[in-house]
Amino acid sequence: MEADQRFLILCGGEILAVAVGNLAVALILQILILAVFLDDRRGYPVFIAAAALYAAAVAISGHILLPLLALGVALGCGYLALTLYDYRLTLWAGGAT
Amino acid sequence: MIRPTRTTGGVAALGLALAAVAILIESPAAALGAGSLGLFILWRAGRFDRDFRALATSLTVNREVGRTILRQGAAVTVRVRVDCTHPPGMEVRVRDIPPAVATGEAPLCRPGETGVYTIRIMAPGRTTFGGVTLSARDPYFSHDLRIRHLNAPGLRVFPVGSAMASGGTDSGMRDLEVDRRAALDGPSVRGFRLYRMGDDPGRIDWKISAKHNAFYVRELTGLQGGTPLVAVDLPTREENDSEVFTRYSMVVTDAVEEAIESRAGCSLLVIAGGEILRFLPGTEDVGEAFAALSGLAPIEPRVPLYRAPGPAVLAARARLPGGEGGLEKAFLARLGGVLTVFARESRSPFADAVKEALAWVDATEIHIYTLARGDVSHLGQLVRQAKTRGMRVVVFAPAGTPILPGVDAVEVI
């Protein structure tokens, strides 16, 4: 399947998940849609666990903005961690021991 | 840093749109959609990073070069094969990086393939390959990494016309490497003069000598201004950039070779900070000059001068103008006296050593090669000593280098 077609399926699936309204159904739909989107599903359970945790946080908090902000912070931390790993890899590539 | 592909950009845009919808209509399902897409991107980035690291660390490069000792400008064929553990779903390409002083471009190869290309080394000296560029991409991210330490084997390049490059049948060179000189090649005779002690006996003209019953030697064109003194200023280790230093050493080697070829000899002075590392007075042998230049590398400054101007500069400063008024004149005279005493008392072993070296070589011109970084007071002292002897000073330095007082010409390297 072409990447563009998959992306259209992803968009359609997201609209469906939002239209359903139920958080549990939306989570299951999300996992199924993204699984279709992937070729190589190594480590996919890790993502499922993270998404389930996030869904639980949304359900428990009862807010919309708070979980989104928390997620933004988590993504920023993840970006910093990746930058650090990349820096170490660049040092190694330059010949540093 | 890893770069997102168009697909990842689309997913991120969709996530942002869902976040906006979630805030506007207060939909938990939309917030979940936005969050899970963000997590999805982060998860994919982490996985790509882990796979890429495994790929990079498993990389082995087998590079075969036709010859590792070759002549400047000679073409050499490089065969490079790269092997690695290939993570699934990742597209991998590797490009070899030729030496910095070589022309030619390596093809982009897949792991397991053998890439063949030809390079031409344009400058003499020792050089190595620049490593390889590892490019990997999956549907969500891509990354290019230059791995410099995979740079074996080293190459040794001799300049055109040197003894090694034009070696005999057992030198291991092919016919291509032979650079046979024409019989009439070389400097022509400008005139004759009486033989002096230390002159090369090979330059004695026996016909003229027999005619006048005294030894006469030939003076060649290009020697009118005397052989130059080439001064090489080594950078300190903390300023070291291997690629820049490689280029710098190539330039120096080239200059020494050119000086010997065109002016039938040169003297060589290698300095680092306030220290003379090597000194080779008046050589006509390219091999000897290259031996003196071999193994040079940026070093730790062992004798820092702490920006001291040296006695010659102090003495110049002591020669103050007379002044106009009686008080000003008296003040300047006293200041001049104080500075003169300082100049007399101030001793610089470096300046003394340079002075002796300059007296030894009897050159009329000094060519100073430098990267001109950090403290250049030793260069100031060198220039001042050269000017004291009436020498012409030419500095070869990177563009934008501040011009030292007393320098006659600056050329960009």
Image: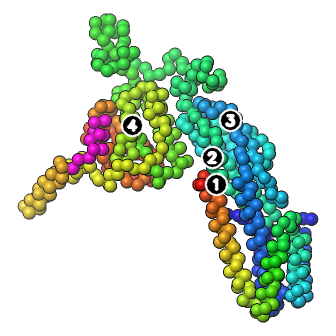
Query: Is B128 in front, or is B225?
Result: B128
N-terminal of the pair, mark 3 or mark 2, is 3
Rate crowding at label 4 as few (under 14), some (14 to 19) or many (20 or more) other CA atoms within 10 Å.
some
Q: Chain of mark 3?
A: B
Residue at label 1? A93
The percent coordinates of residue B323 (x first, y second) are: 13, 58
Are there few (<14), some (14-19), or many (20+) residues within 10 Å of tag 1?
Answer: many
Q: Label 1, secondary structure: give it.
A: helix
Earlier-in-chain disc, 3 versus 4: 3
Look at the picture and state if B208 lies above or below A17.
above
Residue B208 % position (x, y): 34, 9
| Same-chain check, marks 3 and 4 | yes
Q: Chain of mark 4?
A: B
Q: Rounded to the nearest whole Å, what is the CA distance between mark 3 and mark 2?
A: 14 Å
What is the CA distance from the residue labelled 1 to the residue labelled 4? 35 Å
Which SS class for mark 3?
strand
> Quadrant location of residue B40?
bottom right
B381 vs A89, left or right, is left
Question: Three-letter amino acid code at disc 4?
Answer: Arg
Amino acid type of disc 2?
Gly
Amino acid carrying label 3: it is Val
Decide whether the magenta segment is chiefly helix, strand or loop: helix
Do marks 3 and 2 both belong to one polypeptide chain? yes
Residue B278 numbered mark, or none:
4
Q: Is residue B404 visible?
A: no
Residue indicated by mark 3: B65
The segment highlighted magenta reads B346-357
The amino acid on which the numbered mark 1 sits, given as a three-letter code, is Ala
Please report, as a chain letter, where disc 1 is located: A
Look at the picture and state if B103 lies above or below B321: above
Furthest residue in direction left, as rendered:
B326
> Would you name the residue on which mark 2 appears?
B130
